[in-house]
Amino acid sequence: IDEIDFVLENAMTKGKSGCFRPRKKDCFVYVLEGMTTYTFSDTSFTVKKGQILYIAKGSVYGMDILTDRYEFIFADFSFSDAGADTRKSGVFNVSHKAVAEGLFRQLLNVWIDRGKRAEAECLSCLYAIYAKLVQDDGVYTPEYKKEKIKPAAEYILNHYEENLNGCRFGKMCKITETYFRKLFKAVYGMSPVQYINEIRIDRARGLIANSNLSLAEIAGKVGFSDAYYFSRVFKKNTGVAPSSYKKIYSQPEESEQE
């Protein structure tokens, strides 16, 4: 993702609309309320509350709004040119709709703030949304799978800052380690290690923004014994290096010019 161009919460009323010139940017849309059919040159699909729509750069499409109101948050942005010819518009299901909406609202709020910290935080939010799409698309997880791994999931949430290497999570759940990893991937869309790192990076972002701790101190506080590895994981998860993220938060906001 190269840059973000616009983020907006909007609403439309029942009827027909669309984009009849090739889109200049890529776009993610989170549906807050309502239902709409999008018709492209080679396909069509209907999106509804709680789903995420990706509209590819260059798309031309029509919209048929099926409900009295269609409410959504959308973000226009630019992917890198690599793979541009193969990207297709589509609709995505997410396993935790509240989490998805929270990410879009966080992105919207940061964009509205428009301060120095906006660029890095917006990119971080957008990468988190992108990661969730990759992890969750089309996944249906029976409730029994969630319950089966619940002891380990709760342990991770309560002990993420500790050294969890060597933890026998399967034993906590009274199943084999292999079966645990299989169930965990089915529920969360990622390995236990990736999940632990995601929690740690989320906590690290808050510490960078709201404390005077050094990056090395923050790394240790959220469970990373190696500051270099922390930096690598932080950039992979957010798209922004922790040093750049910290630099933005260490600079006071410029006063508005009259």
Image: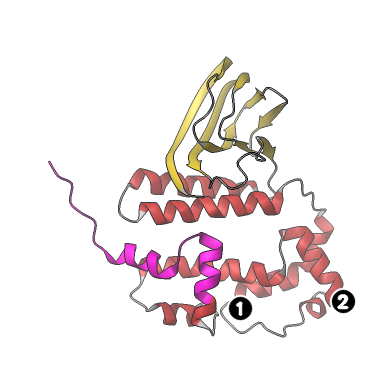
The chief SS type of the magenta part is helix
Q: Residue at x 48, y 56 (%)?
A: 124
Q: How many marks?
A: 2
Give the colour scheme of this rendering.
secondary structure
Check disc 2: other Cα within 10 Å, few if <14, some if 14-19, many if 20+.
Answer: some
The one of 36 and 245 positioned closer to us in this rendering: 245
Residue 130 magenta-highlighted: no
Q: Position of residue 159 (x, y in %)?
A: 61, 78
Q: Residue at x 30, y 51 (%)?
A: 115
Magenta segment boundaries in residue numbering: 230-258
Q: Residue under circle 2?
A: 176
* Residue type for callout 1: His
Say whether residue 11 is left or right of residue 35: left
Q: Residue under circle 1?
A: 159
Q: Residue at x 44, y 36 (%)?
A: 8
Q: Position of residue 74 (x, y in %)?
A: 51, 36
Q: Quadrant of residue 22?
A: top right
Q: Residue at x 53, y 84 (%)?
A: 226
The one of 216 and 70 positioned closer to us in this rendering: 216
Q: Relative to residue 18, is residue 242 depicted above or below?
A: below
